[in-house]
Each structure stands twice: as structure tokens, then as C-alpha cells.
Amino acid sequence: MKNLKTLFAAPIVALALTAGPAMAENEELIDAMEGYVMFQEYHGATIRPEQIPADQWENITIVDTRDAGQYAEDHIPGAINIEWRQILERRDELPTDEQVLVYCNTGTLSAQAGLMLRLTGMDNVRILQGGFTGFKEAGGFEANARAQEADDEAAPEATE
């Protein structure tokens, strides 16, 4: 399956980089994207902060895809800043042997960055659902523990 994804990735990336509104009817581009997405899981590229245990964050390369000004103002601790428009030209800076997590403010721009990286064959890339806003609202690095605690409190008491 990975070979098929790689086969489709090159034409997609090449065409996407030169695509504009006039290329919206480009059948080769459409066929390549359709072939790629047929092998993707629903929500396969996204992850919520609640799904990441606090001790696992240190094993993830976190990429803030917002502009440098937003990054300087505030960001997830440990994140590197690669603006979403630069993600393809700087993809060699990212590991291929560990999870890469991309985020922006709400998930829109990082979804584009994540898709571009995944189309180049980087299947270790995940998009932080809800972005930086969702990360903070969920409890940051403690989102997983908070979610589990809430689940435990909501679970009905076992009766004997």
C-alpha cells in the first residue's frame, strides 16, 4: 500500500505546486488525489490532545506552522516553527522515524501542511485537531490525564 501512496504522491505534489484556479479541471491531478485518498483512514491524519499521554509528548516532533510572529508570541513548549508555506522546502528537517505533529491556531493551515507532507510519503505526520486553541482548552500536556479523569468520574459505579 505504501508503494501506491508513493506512486501517487509525486504527481500530486508536482501538480499541486503549480496548480491554480485554472488547473481545477486537471484530470491527472484529480485522479492522483483520488488514488491517494482511497488509501487513507477517516481521521487517520488527525489526533486530539486528549489522545496523547503527557509522557509521550517528548517523543514527538512538534511543528508550529503559524508565522514567526505568532510563534514568538506563544507556542506549545518544545515546538519548532516552520510556517506552513515552507513545509515542503524544509521537510528534510523533520524525522521520518518518529511522530511529527503539526499545528496552527485552529487546524486549518496545519491541515494543509500535514496533507502536503503526507502526500510526499511522510505517513508519520499527524495534525493536531483544534490546533493551539484546542490544545490550550483541553489542558495542554495534561489533556490526556484530564480526559481520563473526566471519563472515570462519568463512569457509573460498579454494583455487586
Image: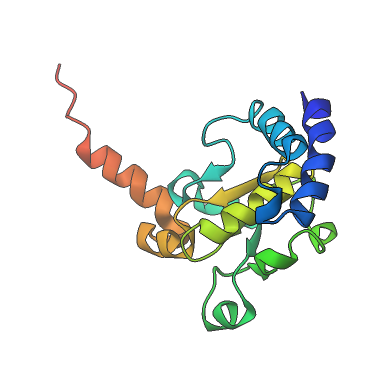
Q: Can residue 101 be seen in the rendering of this structure?
A: no
Of residues 153 and 72, the one drawn nearer to the viewer in this rendering: 72
Q: Residue 31 location, x and y as percent?
A: 72, 31
Q: Residue 33 location, x and y as percent?
A: 69, 36
Of residues 93 and 107, the one drawn nearer to the viewer in this rendering: 107
In the rendered image, the quadrant that contains the C terminus is: top left
Q: How many discs appear? A: 0
Q: Residue at x 44, y 60 (%)?
A: 135
Q: Residue 71 location, x and y as percent?
A: 58, 77
Left-right relation of 113 to 54:
right
- Image-quadrant location for residue 35: top right
What residue occupies the far left of the structure in this picture?
159
Q: Can residue 28 be seen in the rendering of this structure?
A: yes
Left-right relation of 2 to 125:
right
Q: Residue at x 21, y 38 (%)?
A: 154
- Height in image: 73 above or below 116? below
Of residues 79 and 16, the one drawn nearer to the viewer in this rendering: 16
In the rendered image, the quadrant that contains the N terminus is: top right
Left-right relation of 109 to 138:
right
Q: Residue at x 29, y 39 (%)?
A: 151
- Image-quadrant location for residue 152: top left
